[in-house]
Image (cartoon, rainbow, N blue to C red):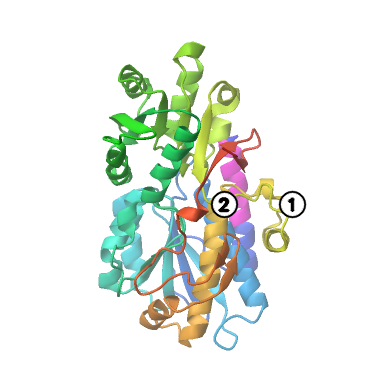
Amino acid sequence: MPCLRRLTAAWLQLFVAAWLAVPISGFAQASAGTDILIALDAEFGHLTSTSDDAIRMGMLTAISEINDAGGVLGGRKLRLIESDNRSIPARGKDNFRRHASDPNIVGVFTGKFSTVALEQAKIADELKLLLLDPWAAADPVIKDDPAGSYAFRLSLRDSWAVPAMMKYLQARGIRQVGVLLPTSGWGRSNEAQAKKFLDSAQGARVVAIEWYHWGAATMLPGYRKLRAAGAQAILLVANEAEGAILVTEVSKLPAAERVPIVSHWGVAGGNFVEMVGPDLDAVDFAVVQTFTFAGRTDKKALDVLSSAGKTLGVQQYRDIPSHVGFAHAYDLTHILARAITLAGSADREQVRAALEKVRDYNGLVGRLAEPFTSKRHEALSPAHVFIGRFQRSGVIERLSY
């Protein structure tokens, strides 16, 4: 199934790219006259990832709407080009530099891997190229004082995710929590948040933190150490591969040895449900989110789904993977287009300044009165964060607790 999904995604990419006349690989320089280019540098070579597909689909849906409405700056069209960082930070950094050398590119959207986005954020200001983040959640991607910064995020951040997960467990009467983290920049970002709960005297508290390496063949050693430390539940930070390994292994344990797991949203950016299969039914597993189409019957959601149907051929929201990636990228693309119009130019510096002045945007994630300001380059807030549960279809439904 994962291979089939990637093949289907590849076919969709080729179809839509041909329809929109968009280069889909390499770094071909623009030769399309007055078109304004937006780049997406994501983990397209990562076989189990779906966040890259979702971000692309959200961007393409928004671009189609913008272009159908007359484009920007008196009729100029937006066009998407892509590059593959394969989830490798050095490759993402090189891709970002190469995009910066093309004056026709107004900004670069990054993918789900914080390790890549963190490297790109280090050079965005130097290169004066917009870094637009619709997924990567590590706090340091966006500066605490972003005045003059070229990095903007419409997504979750770790300092919102960890408290939301802890509050969810507390609401369930759980007081002792073990934290399982990857040895990466994303893991270290979450460690800083988890440590705030180590000495907590009230509510849920962290009893221990364990680490694992990307590509680990087993996740049980860390899980068992956390259980031995008294953990009544596990707060997991993982992507789909390691998350699926842990759930599969825990499902095989005696029922008395299984504890609830609440996960950061990396698992939602891949073929997690397909990889786990029926083992998911044996584990109490929840995931932090900021958006899902499930349960949305409002006009905005229905209009966007209709637009995605016309642009991408999707029949229902279940055809869209990783809903958060789609919604965030859709909204961020529209906000970028507004900033270009407000700036009256595709000049990167002027668009950067205009992004801080966009007002009253009514998007998929809700109304954003001031998406960005000179003192805040985070479009969302903790109020957007909720806990959900995977359905067998792969869709995440919001939990009440």
Residue at 73% in and 61% down: 306
Q: Is residue 93 visible?
A: no
Mark 2 or mark 1: which comes first in sequence? 2
Residue 215 appears left or right of 270:
left
Three-letter amino acid code at the position of disc 1: Gln
Separation of disc 2 and disc 1 at Cα?
19 Å
- Which stretch is magenta? 2-13
Residue at 63% in and 50% down: 320
User: Residue 291, labelled with which disc?
Assistant: 2
User: Residue 280, labelled with which disc?
Assistant: none
Image coordinates of residue 176 in percent, x first then y, are: 37, 27
Quarter of the picture containing the C terminus is top right
Image coordinates of residue 125 in percent, x first then y, are: 28, 70
Q: Which residue is mark 1?
A: 315
Predominant secondary structure, magenta span: helix
Between 11 and 67, the residue placed more toward the observer is 67
